[in-house]
Image (spheres, grey):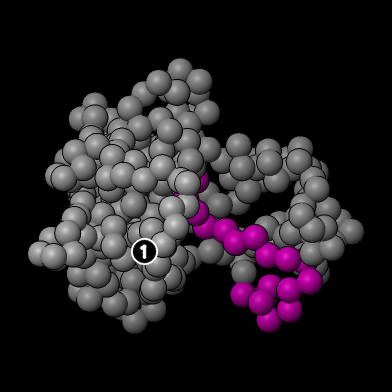
């Protein structure tokens, strides 16, 4: 097989921490099968003795998690942002302003560019709000649009019936405000947050991700070099009474959960992934 010309080697590529965040984020988003661009061979250090690589151990952790938790609910996305279906690609810079406006302060702050893990944090940043919206084309069928609690649009010419139209300059702030109003959980901190709802038992599955503090390294160990000063903290305040809250996946070991009657205080270690399961009171 001819060489591709791309540089290859065990010291190259993303950290195993970033791989883990992408894997678990994708699974909670509804992806049940994941295929990495490098193929299965990067899951092994050696074909001869079938020894797992650092990437392979993350893959195994995901498969073990899927087996233990085959139902992680569905993404809770009560808000639809309406995209003009006639514009390909979107020509409005309003979408660019939304993208930059949702990134957390640390990701926007130029002083953080030299921090540990800054490169990976920049390509996969956290937001100031949980990920509770879909981007939906303006020509989507009515039965799709009716499934959302709120429709938000900045172009009156393509706004579906019942959509709220705001000025382009107010779009980002309207998205942030609407998500905070519709979220079942108040969130503070600068972690990436997914919220899933599981219909079978009315549980909430929460994905928490820390994009800071991990770089590729320790290739034959964890596959990541972690900065212990980059652990991130957050507070979750469910808007409902809850009977229990537990961690169903956490990496690295610095991750922890402290629950009180109304608040959940979380720490996610550098480059970390943490999945919670919250059960409302009956």
Please check the rendered image and state whether residue 139 is part of the magenta-colored stretch, yes or no.
yes
Q: Give the range drawn in magenta.
A: 129-147
* Residue 280 drawn at (x, y percent): 30, 67
* Residue 48 drawn at (x, y percent): 13, 65
* Residue 242 drawn at (x, y percent): 28, 62
Q: Kindly give the residue lying farthest to the right in the view shown.
A: 157
Q: Kindly give the residue lying farthest to the top in the view shown.
A: 111
- In the image, taking residue 105 as reference, residue 160 lies left or right, namely right
For the N terminus, the image quarter is bottom left
For the C terminus, the image quarter is bottom left
- Residue under the point 30% across and 53% down: 20
Looking at the picture, tell me which residue is in the foreground, 34 or 4.
4
Q: Can residue 145 be seen in this view?
A: yes
Looking at the picture, tell me which residue is in the foreground, 51 or 268.
51
Q: Is residue 272 visible?
A: no
- Residue under the point 31% across and 36% down: 215
Q: Mark 1 points at which residue?
A: 39
């Amino acid at each position: 097989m001819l060489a591709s010309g791309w540089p290859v080697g065990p010291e190259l590529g993303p950290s195993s921490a970033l791989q883990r965040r992408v894997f678990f984020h994708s699974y909670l988003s509804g992806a049940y099968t994941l295929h990495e661009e490098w193929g299965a061979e990067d899951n092994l250090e050696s074909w001869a003795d079938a020894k797992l690589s650092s990437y392979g151990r993350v893959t195994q952790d995901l498969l073990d998690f899927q087996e233990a938790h085959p139902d992680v609910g569905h993404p809770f996305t009560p808000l639809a942002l309406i995209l003009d279906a006639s514009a390909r690609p979107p020509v409005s810079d309003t979408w660019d302003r939304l993208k930059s406006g949702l990134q957390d302060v640390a990701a926007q702050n130029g002083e953080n560019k030299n921090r540990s893990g800054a490169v990976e944090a920049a390509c996969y940043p956290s937001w100031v709000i949980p990920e509770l919206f879909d981007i939906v084309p303006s020509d989507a069928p009515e039965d799709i649009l009716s499934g959302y609690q709120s429709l938000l649009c900045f172009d009156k010419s393509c706004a579906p019936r019942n959509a709220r139209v705001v000025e382009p300059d107010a779009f980002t702030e309207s998205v942030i405000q609407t998500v905070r109003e519709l979220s079942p959980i108040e969130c503070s901190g600068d972690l990436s947050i997914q919220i899933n709802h599981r219909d079978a038992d009315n549980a909430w599955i929460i994905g928490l991700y820390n994009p800071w503090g991990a770089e590729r390294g320790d290739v034959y160990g964890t596959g990541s070099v972690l900065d212990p000063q980059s652990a991130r903290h957050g507070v979750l305040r469910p808007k409902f009474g809850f009977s229990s809250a537990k961690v169903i996946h956490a990496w690295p070991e610095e991750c922890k959960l402290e629950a009180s009657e109304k608040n959940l205080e979380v720490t996610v270690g550098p480059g970390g992934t943490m999945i919670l399961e919250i059960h409302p009171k009956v």
